[in-house]
Image (spheres, rainbow, N blue to C red):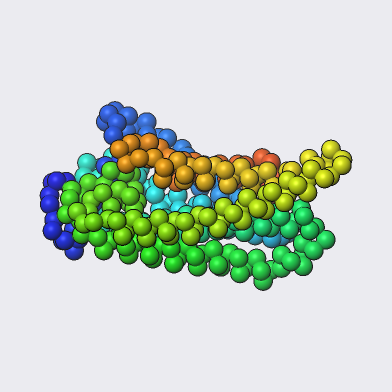
């Protein structure tokens, strides 16, 4: 059934998500692993958003961005994880054509938005550490809203282009997608048309998205590190370092996984799946942990919420 040939993508009504090529007995273990990680994603990101919204002391640009980061992590992991877990128990492992389009569109939307949002957060830390006296003026509510809205706008434009280019390809090979979700590269392998133009446009689009965001992050942190090294007191350096180290950890994990996946040759699809797993589930799970464990304000806010709850009880 999965080897049925089609002459045009309009004849394709569904795809097969192959998932991980492991023994059937290991599916239960993988299901439990996905379930545990996804539960931690839900708990961590919903908890982070709740803390930020309920504590007035966290009504600052940094936590405005962090709340949006938790929202993005929550939703793009939710686009992938539930369907992957269902497929561990499904014999057909199928996903409808419309479902595949929706999954790719939403995932591309949120992952690109996160890249731009992380760049905005790096700029926020640059202003906070290098120009602290002007921070409240420069990082106004209006600018923060524009940066977040701009991140979503760039994500939406990129997602529309990527999704439309992918699903206008003629799918005349097997319907079996060698991945655990609908992604551009595995879908391109199903096409029998010349992919040169498609790949060049995808590469250009990736460059337009990745290079500016990485440049903003790198330049911001060069200035930040330079400023921190000029601080004479050890306590001052430690305090300054704590304000940006969490964000640097999040950026490193996300971009490290993305680069690893896209630099992995097509002949090693299982390595690509592992890298995809890192930024679709592991990164959204780690982000709230990184920010909560290394952030005194978040820990204090959580402590106050727990104390109020104990008082009520």
Residue 22 percent across, percent down from the top left: 29, 31
Q: Residue at x 64, y 47 (%)?
A: 247
Q: Residue at x 73, y 58 (%)?
A: 127
Q: Is residue 146 above or below residue 91?
A: below
> As drawn, which residue projects farthest toward the right?
233
- Residue 310 at least partly seen: no
Task: Report the front residue among 264 and 149.
Answer: 264
Quarter assignment of residue 178: top left
Q: Residue at x 28, y 52 (%)?
A: 188
- In-image side of 302 versus 282 (left or right): right
Residue 198 percent across, percent down from the top left: 31, 59
Q: Is residue 168 above or below residue 114?
A: below
Q: How many marks?
A: 0
Task: Report the front residue among 272 and 32.
Answer: 272
Q: Is residue 158 above or below residue 245?
A: below
Q: Residue at x 66, y 40 (%)?
A: 293
- In-image side of 265 versus 289 (left or right): left
- Residue 104 at least partly seen: yes
- In-image side of 13 versus 62 (left or right): left
Residue 257 percent across, percent down from the top left: 48, 42
Residue 237 percent across, percent down from the top left: 80, 42
């Amino acid at each position: 059934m999965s080897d049925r040939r089609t002459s045009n993508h309009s004849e394709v009504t569904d795809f097969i998500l192959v998932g991980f090529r492991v023994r059937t007995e290991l599916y239960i273990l993988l299901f439990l692993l996905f379930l545990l990680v996804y539960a931690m994603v839900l708990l961590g990101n919903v908890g982070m958003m709740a803390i930020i919204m309920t504590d007035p002391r966290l009504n600052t640009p940094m936590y405005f961005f962090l709340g949006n980061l938790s929202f993005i992590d929550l939703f793009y992991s939710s686009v992938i994880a539930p369907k992957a877990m269902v497929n561990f128990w499904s014999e057909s492992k199928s996903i409808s054509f419309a479902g595949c389009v929706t999954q790719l569109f939403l995932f591309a939307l949120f992952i690109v938005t996160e890249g731009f949002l992380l760049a905005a957060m790096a700029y926020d830390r640059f202003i906070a550490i290098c120009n602290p006296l002007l921070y409240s003026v420069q990082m106004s509510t209006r600018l923060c809203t524009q940066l977040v809205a701009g991140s979503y706008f760039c994500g939406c434009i990129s997602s529309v282009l990527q999704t439309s280019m992918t699903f206008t390809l003629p799918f005349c090979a097997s319907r079996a997608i060698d991945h655990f979700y609908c992604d551009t590269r595995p879908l391109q392998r199903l096409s029998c048309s010349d992919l040169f133009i498609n790949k060049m446009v995808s590469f250009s689009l990736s460059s337009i998205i990745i290079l500016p965001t990485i440049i903003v992050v790198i330049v911001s942190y060069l200035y930040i590190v330079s400023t921190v090294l000029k601080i004479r007191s050890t306590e001052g350096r430690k305090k300054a370092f704590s304000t940006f180290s969490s964000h640097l950890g999040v950026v490193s994990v996300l971009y490290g996984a993305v680069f690893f996946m896209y630099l992995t040759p097509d002949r090693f699809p299982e390595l690509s799946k592992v890298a995809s797993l890192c930024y679709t589930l592991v990164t959204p799970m780690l982000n709230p942990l990184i920010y909560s464990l290394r952030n005194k304000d978040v820990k204090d806010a959580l402590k106050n919420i727990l104390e109020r709850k104990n008082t009520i009880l």
